[in-house]
Each structure stands twice: as structure tokens, then as C-alpha cells.
Image (tube, grey):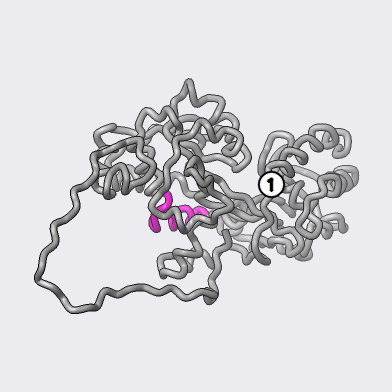
Amino acid sequence: MTVRICAAAAAILVSAGCGASSTTSTPSKPLPPVNVRALSLKEGFGDMDRLATAARQEGSLNVIGLPHDWMNYGGLIATFTEKYGVKVNEIEPNASSARQIQAAAQLRPDVFDLTLDVAVAHANRFAPYRVAGWQDVPDDVKDPSGAWYAAYGSYMSIGYDPRVPAPASFADLAKPGYTVALDGDPLRSEAAFDGVMAASLERGTPHVRRGVELFGRLGQAGRLTDPAKANVIVTWDHVNARRAAQRPDGWKVVIPKDAPLGSYHVQAIYKNAPHPAAARLWEEFLFSDEGQNLLLRGYARPARAEAMLMRGKLDTQMGAKLPVPPGPPVLLTIPQTDAGKSYLKREWTKSVR
């Protein structure tokens, strides 16, 4: 997940094909029959041109839960339409991951953009598909069968007004002078929930009570507020980095060294997608170098970033605008996420007032 602007500790051997030229022509292999529900580009279409043709014949693509200001999805949708001539129908742009799944049978999206826990819980609803860049996606954030696969990620961060001392850790927020906001209600907002979980980390392990106690102390001191009144906002680094780019006051962003909580959003194709070829074209586009760099322009950390960097395909100028991470991310397991949500349901309201 980390956008590494440093020397890669690996060598890539590329065959340049510089042998003697030959005048002997070899017959090209026949392309496979088009299969719009195939498990891969090669198996179902042979190449991108045939996939794009099949998608144009379907005429449109249904997406759900993709607001234009989230990860530059506005730019991605516009570029996809212009590039391939496929109309994009945008359904409930602000739908949460849970809502996307809940509404699928009625609203009939072709593709989903989901949190990892929701994707894992509903993997049987997806049509397996391995994008051409499959090998570049880290193994721990993709389903081996191709049911779901991470497109981008973020680190939980602390954004702060430069007029207050730079916080080095979540524990620093308990010191005087900070008025703190989470990105929503942690009982309803994934970003706010993950903010509490980041504050709970100790040596890479979440201790939910620890995070709740911190925000409980802030609440009792009258220093837990909403983002409009806060001089510190705890949310994903893509949100804080975008805020820093838009605010003239020098808003700063830090990823605490002792709490590098990360999270990925994953893609999946609906098993009953009304436009199966367009769905596969959309995924190929998102995971292409162009699509991954467009996500980076939305301050996301592309899933293929490391491989793209080594091949000289990553927009390093844009990558340099993201806060520097302290190291590899800590990714919550599904049991840790479930345990955290259960604890907050019991304790948040009575602990944080």
C-alpha cells in the first residue's frame, strides 16, 4: 500500500528481445471466443480491444457508491466514458459498503467498491475475475479465486492546524490545546470507527478499550467536537491530504509512528451484473497504470503502486504529496474488526459524552 519513493530492494530482469531478426513469419494464434463472464481478459476476450467492443455492445455500466470527490472517482468515470464510449449510470453515489450489498438485487449494479470486511462476508455474491495486473496486487488483499481485490488504500492519520504543536501520537491528543474531531460517528462511520481503532493500537495490536478511553477523556473535557470546530481531525490520510491541498492555512498531516493503521477498499463484480463485459472493462481500467494514477490524484495509495514505481509508471510527483508513512501498514483482521464494533456498540455511548 505504501507509495515508496525510494530505491527498490529488488532487481527486475527484462528480456529486451535483441536477438537477430528473422524473416520467417509465424501464424498468429486464433483468439478465443468472446465470453463476457470469463475469469480473465486472456481467457474471455484475448485483448482489450475485444473487451471494449463487447462492453460498447452492452451500452452502459452501472456503478454504486462512487461519489465524485472520493478518490477522484469523478475523473475516473469521465475518463472511462471518453476512452471507451460506455455510458456510466451512477446509482446512489453515497451508498456505504453495507448499503451496496443490501440494494444489489433491486438496483442491479455491475461493480462494487467495498471495505474489506464487507467483501469477505459476501464473497459468494461476486463473479470471480482476475485483472491483467493481478500479480501486482499484494496477496493479503485479494481473494485467491478472484472474487475481490484491493484497488487502493490509505493510512489513518492526524490532520492538524499548524498553530498547535505537532502531535506525534494519538496519546498526545490528550494534552491541553487540542480540540479533536473524528470523521463522523464511529457507530455508523467506517472512517470514525477506524480512527478509534488506530488510537487503540499498541505494538501493532488493537486494544479497543484503549481507544475508547482516549476519546472518552477528550469528550469529558469538552475537547471532542465536530470537524468544523476542531484544530485536529482524525481520518484517512487521503482526506487530510486533500484538505491540506485545499486550505491556505498550511494544514499538516502526520501518520503516527506507533499506530500505522491501514485499510484497503476492494473491487468486485456482481454475480448478476447486467453488463458483465462493461464490468470487466471497468476493473481493467481501474487497475491499469492510467486508472491507478487517477486514483493517486485523489490522494489514494494505489494497490499496484510498488510495481508501477519499479517500472517507472507511477506518478511520483503526485505520490510525493502524500504524508510519509512510518512503515508497512497494520491491517485489522476480520475478527479484530468484529470485536471492535461489538465493543463500541456496548461502550461508546456511555463512555464518550
User: Would residue 6 be found to the left or right of residue 110 on screen?
Assistant: right
Question: Which residue is more in the foreground, 15 or 188?
Answer: 15
Q: Position of residue 287 (x, y in %)?
A: 42, 52
Q: Amino acid at mark 1?
A: Thr
The part of the chain drawn in magenta is: 286-298
Q: Is residue 49 magenta?
A: no
Work out whether 326 lies above or below 69.
below
Q: Position of residue 139 (x, y in %)?
A: 55, 54
Residue 222 seen in the current view: no
Q: Based on the displayed image, in which of its 4 quarters is residue 314 positioned?
A: bottom left
Q: Is residue 295 magenta?
A: yes
Q: Position of residue 170 (x, y in %)?
A: 79, 57
Question: Which residue is more in the foreground, 190 or 15?
Answer: 15
Q: Secondary structure at mark 1?
A: loop
Q: Based on the displayed image, in which of its 4 quarters is residue 351 positioned?
A: top right
User: Would residue 159 be found to the left or right of residue 297 on screen?
Assistant: right
Residue at 62% x, 66% y is 324
Residue 111 seen in the current view: yes
User: Dividing the image into 4 quarters, which one contains the N terminus?
Assistant: bottom right
Q: From the image, tell me which residue sits under label 1.
A: 333
Within-10-Å neighbours for mark 1: few <14, some 14–19, many 20+? few
Residue at 27% x, 48% y is 46
User: Dividing the image into 4 quarters, which one contains the C terminus?
Assistant: top right
Residue at 69% x, 61% y is 255
